[in-house]
Image (tube, grey):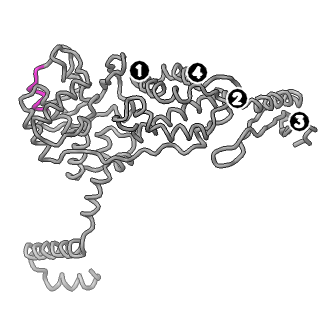
Amino acid sequence: MSKRGHGEGTIGKRPDGTYYASLMVGYQKDGRPLRKWVYGKTRKEVQNKLDQLKELKKRGVTTDLTFAALMDKWLDFKASQVRPSTLESYRMLLEQYVKPELGDTRLDRLTALSLQDFYSKLPSLAQQKKGRASKPLSARTCKYVHTLIKGILDQAVRWDLLWRNVADQVMPPKAEKKDVEFWDAEEAMRFLAACKEHRLYPLFYLAITTGLRRSELLGVRWEDIDFARGWLKIRQAVKQGMRGVPTEVSRPKTRAGERTIALGEDMLDLLKAMPRDPSGWVFASEAGTVIEPRNLNRVFYDLVAKAQVRKIRLHDLRHSYASLAIRRGIHVKTLAERLGHTDVSFTLNTYAHVYDEQRRAAGLSLADLVQEPIQQSVQQSSEKTEEKPERTEEGKSKKRFFGQ
């Protein structure tokens, strides 16, 4: 590397004859310097780029955008990448909680401290908007808001609107881990008995015996069922729309969601006995259209009240299936595939409390672990001895000779 010119900063020459320069513009989360690099064919070209970097460093950003303007640009950018319902959930959270508090802040004045202060009061914002009687914003929602903010600022860095993401410097809200709710076998049977005469009885039966999501249950079409092989292919999902966004039918979010699962003979018999709606939906509305997800919720809660079982969410039928399957010894990888989980570790973490029961059951005493198998082995050996004819003396001597 050649000697740096006076006042040129960190300009150097590469082995191929080109030049480079760097300028420290801040610090990373771990305290290491954050540097920006420029390259050019001549020293003068690199010097000009370095001077531009220095000027931009003084300003902190390359734009005078407010955070609200950046959010709008980011939403437009995401519109072609996510589902309408997902985009609307982004927009709702940003407009309700982020824009009123941080929207007018210019990007060059958005600091880690101002962001940390926002997170501190975020849980109470819902109460301020809806009245003191409302619940604070959940820790999970607060964590989701942070994820959105971090994603927006990450994109701003990629767009060269910011040098660094201040969201990397703050302590994000912690999402509480809630224990999943589920029915035991007796509660599941009581519920099914209570809704046996309802036209959607097969839907709830399918939910409890497969753990399908609400969107997947409503997305089942007759063409997805292979009665000869006993398979059901999950190809589409019915998502509830938000604030003017209509209910949408789309492919599952992940590749793991597009899966084929085996159905029990009892489930197949139920499906065979069902009348087929011309629409092609297995579980169609009375008008022959796709069932609105929120309407299915209403039906479910009415049936829960009728069955007089513990009130859980419709989604918790999925957890009920998983819990019952684990107790029946279904392997975790098989369970993860049936549930459409991308990672087996997610299945283990979600149902850790159920697997704890299996772990406790594995704490066998020495008698359980050794003595009973020994007794079985001795019994089997004695049975074999009684079945086999006694060896001749010649055979016994050969066995001893060959060390057998």
Query: Which residue is at the front of the view, 392 or 294?
Result: 294
Tags 3 and 4 touching, CB below 8 Å: no
Query: Which residue is at the front of the view, 88 or 371?
Result: 88
Of the image marks 1 and 4, the number of the one nearer the N terminus: 4
Q: For the residue marked with disc 3, what is the amino acid?
A: Glu
Q: Secondary structure at mark 1?
A: helix
368, above or below 71, in the image: below
Of the image marks 2 and 1, the number of the one nearer the N terminus: 2
Q: Secondary structure at mark 2?
A: loop
Disc 3 designates what residue?
8
Single out the mark in the foreground, 1 or 4: 4
Query: Which residue is at the front of the view, 136 or 178?
Result: 136
Q: For the residue marked with disc 4, what is the amino acid?
A: Ala
Callout 2: 10 Å neighbours few (<14), some, many (20+)? many
Single out the mark in the foreground, 3 or 4: 4
Q: For the residue marked with disc 2, what is the amino acid?
A: Val
Disc 2 designates what residue?
61
Callout 3: 10 Å neighbours few (<14), some, many (20+)? some
Disc 1 designates what residue?
84
Quarter of image, res 112 = top right
Distance, label 2 to label 1, CA atoms, is 31 Å
Residue in view at x 45 percent, y 34 percent: 125
Disc 4 designates what residue?
69
